[in-house]
Amino acid sequence: MTGAAEKGTTNLHGSWFGHERLSAKCAIRPSILIERDDKIFVLVHAGCDWHNRLQFAEGTLAIMTLTLLRGMRTPISFRSNTGLFFTVLRPRLARFTTRAESAQATEAKAAAKSIQLATKEAAEQKTQGFEAIIGIETHVQLSTVTKAFCSCPYNYGSQPNSTICSTCMGHPGTLPVLNEKVVECAVKLGLALNCEISMSSKFDRKQHFYPDLPKGYQISQFDIPIAKKGYVDLDLPVEFGGRHRKFGITRVHMEEDAGKLLHSESGSYSQVDLNRAGVPSLEIVSEPDMRTGIEAAEYGAELQRIVRYLGVSNGNMQEGSLRCDVNVSVRPVGQSEFGTKVEIKNMNSFSEINRAIDYEISRQILLHKEGQADQIVQETRLWDESSQKTFTMRKKEGLADYRYFPEPDLPEVVLTTDYIDEISKSLPELPEAKRRRYENMGLSMQDVLFLANDDNVAHFFDSTLEHGADAKVACNWIMGDIAAYLKNEKLSIDETKLTPLELSELIASIKNGTIRGKIGKEIADPAAIEAMVDKVIADNPKQLEKYRAGKTKLQGFFAGQVMKASKGKANPVLLNKILGEKLNAN
């Protein structure tokens, strides 16, 4: 059926991305929009019989239903009694392959000019007369066995929708049950961030309207978080001045994660994976204390170190276990009021955080200098790594848009002093404490940062000292030859066969003159040398026959071949001992 809508038809005009008018012969209510490239999928509830057809101003389109959890489109006859269907709206404008490309097309002309900050000096030159105000919201996915409010497990990379239940899917009548491990992790992190722990806190509903959150709200915390008023101490890298900085923490609160959308390669449809829905998460909100991209990146890296030291999360950004949303504004130096805040998302490493912030600072300063500061609006922007720019994603929501209200299905979280004290006593030595301890040993700041940045490296170093090794010598070995070997072999220090005891014995042997320092870096593993000797002998049967016939000077030939295979690193004494035994064996 084509043409204008018939009498009695309800029209939905809208500003839905500027698409064609949607008309129905019955009362209809849009519920979910999914925009994918050349199509818009609209989940609609129909308050009428399925035999009433939808009409469009420019032709009839096929009506399809969509099973959200499977991402499959099925004919309407299969869902005729549900009152739900999916339909496709045709846009006036061609869509783009990615959200970043789509955003780029609508970018304001005034912000089209980009500024690349190649060096620290260039960054300082560009910001003369202005200062940046930076705050970060960090989402930490907890490494609990089960989800926050149900008993479903969660493993990264599982088959879509394989670890879900009625609670994850938001079915009516299901009730959440709080995982006490989430509270324990929250208290641990709150204490590690020097926060005040709330003896009584509560959960709230944060309203979202998105396909990967089927119940229509997220369980979070609003006005009474579990921890607040903390701070983080850190040391900037030596190449950026090595200064000690303290950044405030506004709050730490518990919440559940949402599911995720899986977009088809063709871009014609999107599927919903609810495995991640309900996974426990902690959000850490910083004070706007940072002023540069490197400070923000180091702040994020310090949070990653802390959660790994505590064992509450693996902190892997590539898995989404740690995500940082950055808020950036600029203002003239001396001005007390904050500028318009812009949120940046889609940064998958700390170096990307640094680059995204530097670009956004430059973009905003450029608009200020050109008298177009009113072009800076409160919005969410995406960082695009390929173009090294940020692009508009959506206008930023306000608190009123989330319609927070207390979660009626969960009681208050009430803690006792004994419970908090018990957790406090279980905390490990944290990165800041390790750095100060290593600094007191007389190590340079470069050494201190290298050792404390990785808990496994710090543990190896401390264990080596417990066996009597000198701190500076042990540090030199770990940062030098051992680090080079690990990098070359793509291993972590806990994946090597070298033990702290063996390193301490090697250091002691060099110190007392038992072996020379150069030999200490040679291959002194009997098994490794024996394997090379066996191979050389097997590859040279004629020389072996001559040796055993009396030409014993050929031992030098065999030794030379082993040294060649080991690139000169085989211990000569150990080599000659093993080689003699092998050559003279019957």
Image (tube, rainbow, N blue to C red):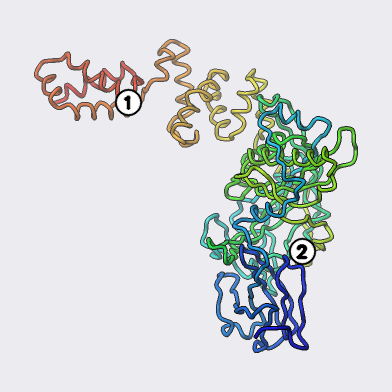
Could you tell me which quadrant the N terminus lies in?
Answer: bottom right
The numbered dot on residue 207 is 2
State left or right for residue 259 relative to residue 194: left
Q: Which secondary structure, mark 1?
A: helix
- Residue nearest the observer in this picture, 425 or 100: 100
- Residue 209 location in percent, x, y? 73, 65
* Residue occupying the point 76% across, 28% down: 125
Q: Are marks 2 and 1 in contact (CB under 8 Å)?
A: no
- Residue nearest the observer in this picture, 521 or 560: 560
* Residue occupying the point 67% across, 38% down: 355
Cα separation, mark 2 vs mark 1, equals: 65 Å
- Residue 392 location in percent, x, y? 72, 52
Q: Which secondary structure, mark 2?
A: strand
Question: Quarter of the image holding residue 559?
Answer: top left
- The first of marks 2 and 1 along the sequence is 2
Q: Is residue 314 in sight in this rendering?
A: no
460 relative to 150, above or below: above
Residue type, label 2: Gln
Residue type, label 1: Pro
- Residue nearest the observer in this picture, 135 or 520: 135
Could you tell me which quadrant the C terminus lies in?
Answer: top left
* Residue occupying the point 68% across, 38% down: 354
Q: Is residue 24 in sight in this rendering?
A: yes
* Residue occupying the point 30% across, 25% down: 565
Q: Residues within 10 Å of mark 1 (few under 14, many from 20)?
A: some
Q: Residues within 10 Å of mark 2 (few under 14, many from 20)?
A: some
State left or right for residue 155 relative to residue 1: left
Residue beneath label 1, please? 526
